[in-house]
């Protein structure tokens, strides 16, 4: 394979992965109308769109000879965001003008008027410029009714954070989902990595009978699909829950208030499940890293008088930061994005739903409000992105530099 | 008093026995070098003394204390590894302080001991650096410093110079020798380099295939090797060997050799068990041969190596035995030439 070909393939992969992200972010920053009517790729270039504006407000009845105003000001007076700007291309004039064929009669015409051309509106001369300025001149002071005019505007790209504000502050669904996801993900990352680090050290550097077989068993557990274990896991949790309920009834006087029931689907069930399913890979990854640390380092520590626990905490953990960081990123992403485990084993209360379930529910509630759906999706994505960027420096190898020759 | 005593030490890895019945006595303050080709078990023997490997059978005493059941840290030893094994995430100071910290010394005491060790090694300015920011020689020094700080009865060095370049190796060798003189601690040093062994050791232990071949002072081993292996291993270029028979002097200190078209009497006979007529090998060091047009030993030159301080000539005798001649001067000899030598039988050996 030539270098250029490799680069092309790489570039393609990057595009394939980055494009959906750009689409999501772009759509979430567009107005509802824009996101409904055109694709995200049109958001970056000027687009010609029709807008209706009225020449002046209804109550204004002060007579005038010449009125001047600006189409964009008129258009934007009620908009808080997504303000229209750009060039006014033309105006579609729709109204009655004197009929040249029939004396004294008028006829309805539709005509495109361009910038600088004079247009007869309610017997006044209406002229607009492409920057939106218009004048409406009458032979003598008049107080005409406002006229609604359709203007075709070559509109500049415009973005706004309305969708985010709506999703985050209109109701508590998304903030709750964010909090729930953190409640699930942080312990479900820290618990397995802690257990796995101890286990990995034992598998790598401690001698005990059956070590290799045990390791093989742990690694082969990786092939067990989560779905396969749902039923037994659920049964286990409900067994524990009913046992806890009876214990609760026996120990406290909850019967009086009828609050004895202990839930089986809780955040804790998610922590346990994610820990259990994350451990095989974690142990495998960490053991392989830790077993590769120079043997002399550990021997040197033993001669210096360090116990296994001291070697682990003062040598293995600091030196394994790259491996620990990469696994925590994996586990964090996997738990954060997990839908199925949370759906079956997690709490079902609406306030406790994790982000992927909330997103799935929003598909129903927001239907075709793409900008809102995309805004929630971006919020759920931004967390892993931040985690990844902040941990990324630990990926840099070379932490071992200087410990052994050539290192 | 920190003498080290090994009694009937055996070590097997699975079915492979790598150390066979080693008995050794090391005096207090002695500098002992274990030397041998790679795979001879010298590092394993050192690791057995350190406690990094468990004995299969036998006994080890350090300072008259049986240490077989003690962990490495309780044996009163400190070890310098071939790869230095510095803790990469700690500064030099913390590398040296690690063992003291684990023993629960006070901060002030740790600082004082680390600084004292740093002064001995002249590396006070390096204390705040990480190992990655040090050169090979400096890392080596930190590794030694880490050993000194522990104030051990016995220093163990496992091929400490093999990762350094030639010039630095010489300097560090000299420093280790000085350090030993200064500290006076018992030192066991493993190397495959016979020059290091010859220059550093009070006592050399030559090992081969897990067995001790000979123990003695460097000159003892050089002048009176106990067997062909020791004779061939020490000295550079290697000793020359010629096939022949023992034609007299069996059972005495000196014997007569016949073979290779020459006859020599009064040669040191290593084995008292050989009888007249037995096949023996005559060993002569390349430096102990003398150019002599009427000499008994003749060969055809195949290669001449000019080393500046020394000239090494590779030759082949009439019976196609390769041998070498080394002279401390530049010689006008060319490949293909016939050269004759004589030698002093008193400096040759019969094996």
Image (cartoon, rainbow, N blue to C red):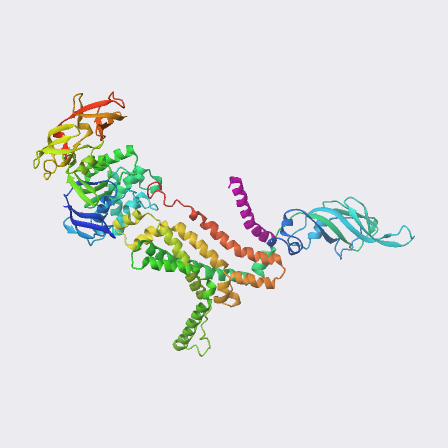
Q: Quadrant of residue B244?
A: top left
Depth order, front residue of A151/A265: A265
Q: Residue A375 location, x and y as percent?
A: 58, 56
Q: Residue A30 location, x and y as percent?
A: 62, 53
Q: Is residue A110 left or right of residue A291?
A: right
Depicted A377 relative to depicted A89: above or below: below
Q: Is residue A125 left or right of residue A387?
A: right
Q: Residue A280 location, x and y as percent?
A: 40, 58
Q: Is residue A350 magenta?
A: no
| Residue A286 visible (yes or no) | yes
- The quadrant the C terminus of chain A occupies is top left
Q: Where does the magenta region start and end?
A: A1-26
In the displayed orientation, state which residue is furthest to the right.
A103
Identify the residue shown where x is 16% and y is 23%.
Answer: B295
| Residue A191 visible (yes or no) | no
Q: Is residue A359 left or right of residue B267?
A: right
Give the mark count. Answer: 0
Identify the residue shown where x is 79% and y is 55%.
Answer: A145
Depth order, front residue of A332/A105: A332
Q: Is residue A9 magenta?
A: yes
Q: Residue B279 location, x and y as percent?
A: 15, 36
Depth order, front residue of A15/B247: B247
Q: Main secondary structure of the magenta part?
A: helix
């Amino acid at each position: 394979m030539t270098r250029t070909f490799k680069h092309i393939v790489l570039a393609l992969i990057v595009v394939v992965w980055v494009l959906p992200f750009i689409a999501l972010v772009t759509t979430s920053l567009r107005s509802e109308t824009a996101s409904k009517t055109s694709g995200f790729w049109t958001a970056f270039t000027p687009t010609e769109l029709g807008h209706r504006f009225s020449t002046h407000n209804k109550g204004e009845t002060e007579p005038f000879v010449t009125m001047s105003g600006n189409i964009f000001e008129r258009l934007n007076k009620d908009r808080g965001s997504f303000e229209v700007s750009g060039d006014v291309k033309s105006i579609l004039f729709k109204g009655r003008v004197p009929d040249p064929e029939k004396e004294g009669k008028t006829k309805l015409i539709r005509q495109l008027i361009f910038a600088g051309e004079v247009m007869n509106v309610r017997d006044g001369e209406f002229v607009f410029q492409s920057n939106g300025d218009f004048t409406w001149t009458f032979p003598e002071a008049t107080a005409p009714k406002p006229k609604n005019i359709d203007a075709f505007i070559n509109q500049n790209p415009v973005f706004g954070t309305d969708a985010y504000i709506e999703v985050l502050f209109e109701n508590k669904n998304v903030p709750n989902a964010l909090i729930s996801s953190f409640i699930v993900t942080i312990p479900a990352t820290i618990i397995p990595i802690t257990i796995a680090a101890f286990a990995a050290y034992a598998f790598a550097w401690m001698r005990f009978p059956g070590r290799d077989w045990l390791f093989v068993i742990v690694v082969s557990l990786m092939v067990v699909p989560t779905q396969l274990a749902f039923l037994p896991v659920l049964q286990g949790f409900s067994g524990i829950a009913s046992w806890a309920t009876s214990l609760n009834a026996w120990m406290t006087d909850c019967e009086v208030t009828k609050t004895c029931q202990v839930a089986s689907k809780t955040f804790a069930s998610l922590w346990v499940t994610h820990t259990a399913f994350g451990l095989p890979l974690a142990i495998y990854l960490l053991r392989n890293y830790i077993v590769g640390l120079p043997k002399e380092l550990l021997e040197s520590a033993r001669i210096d008088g360090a116990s296994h626990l001291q070697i682990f905490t003062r040598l293995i953990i600091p030196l394994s930061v790259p491996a620990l960081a990469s696994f925590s990123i994996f586990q964090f992403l996997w738990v954060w994005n997990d839908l199925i485990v949370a759906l079956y084993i997690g709490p079902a209360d609406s306030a406790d739903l994790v982000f992927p379930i909330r997103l799935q529910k929003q598909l129903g509630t927001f239907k075709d409000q793409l900008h809102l759906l995309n805004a929630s999706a971006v919020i759920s994505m931004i967390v892993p992105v931040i985690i990844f960027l902040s941990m990324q420096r630990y990926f840099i190898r070379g932490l071992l530099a200087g410990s052994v020759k050539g290192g | 008093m920190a003498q080290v005593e090994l009694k009937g030490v055996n070590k097997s890895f699975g079915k492979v026995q790598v150390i066979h019945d080693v008995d050794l006595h090391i005096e207090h303050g002695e500098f002992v070098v274990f030397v041998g080709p790679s795979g001879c078990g010298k590092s394993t023997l050192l690791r057995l003394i350190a406690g990094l490997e468990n004995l299969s059978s036998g006994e080890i005493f350090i300072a008259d204390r049986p240490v077989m059941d003690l962990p490495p840290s309780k044996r009163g030893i400190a070890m310098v590894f071939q790869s230095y094994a510095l803790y990469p995430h700690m500064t030099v100071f913390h590398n040296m302080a690690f063992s003291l910290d684990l023993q629960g010394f006070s901060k002030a005491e740790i600082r004082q001991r680390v600084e004292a060790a740093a002064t001995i090694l002249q590396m006070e300015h390096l204390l705040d650096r990480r190992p990655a920011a040090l050169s090979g020689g400096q890392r080596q020094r930190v590794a030694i410093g880490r050993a000194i700080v522990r104030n051990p009865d016995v220093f163990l060095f496992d091929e400490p110079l093999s990762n350094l370049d030639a010039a630095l190796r010489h300097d560090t060798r000299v420093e280790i020798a000085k350090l030993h003189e200064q500290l006076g601690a018992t030192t066991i040093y493993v190397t495959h380099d016979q020059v290091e062994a010859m220059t550093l050791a009070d006592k050399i232990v030559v090992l081969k295939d897990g067995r001790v071949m000979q123990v003695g002072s460097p000159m003892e081993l050089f002048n009176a090797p106990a067997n062909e292996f020791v004779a061939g291993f020490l000295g550079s270029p290697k000793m020359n060997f010629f096939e022949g028979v023992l034609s007299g002097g069996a059972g005495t200190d000196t014997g007569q050799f016949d073979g290779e078209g020459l006859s020599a009497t009064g040669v040191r006979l290593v084995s008292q068990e050989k009888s007249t007529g037995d096949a023996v090998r005559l060993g002569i060091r390349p430096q102990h041969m003398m150019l002599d047009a009427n000499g008994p030993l003749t060969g055809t030159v195949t290669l001449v190596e000019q080393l500046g301080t020394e000239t090494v000539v590779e030759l082949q005798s009439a019976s196609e035995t390769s041998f070498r001649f080394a002279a401390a001067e530049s010689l006008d000899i060319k490949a293909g030439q016939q050269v004759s030598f004589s030698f002093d039988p008193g400096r040759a050996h019969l094996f």
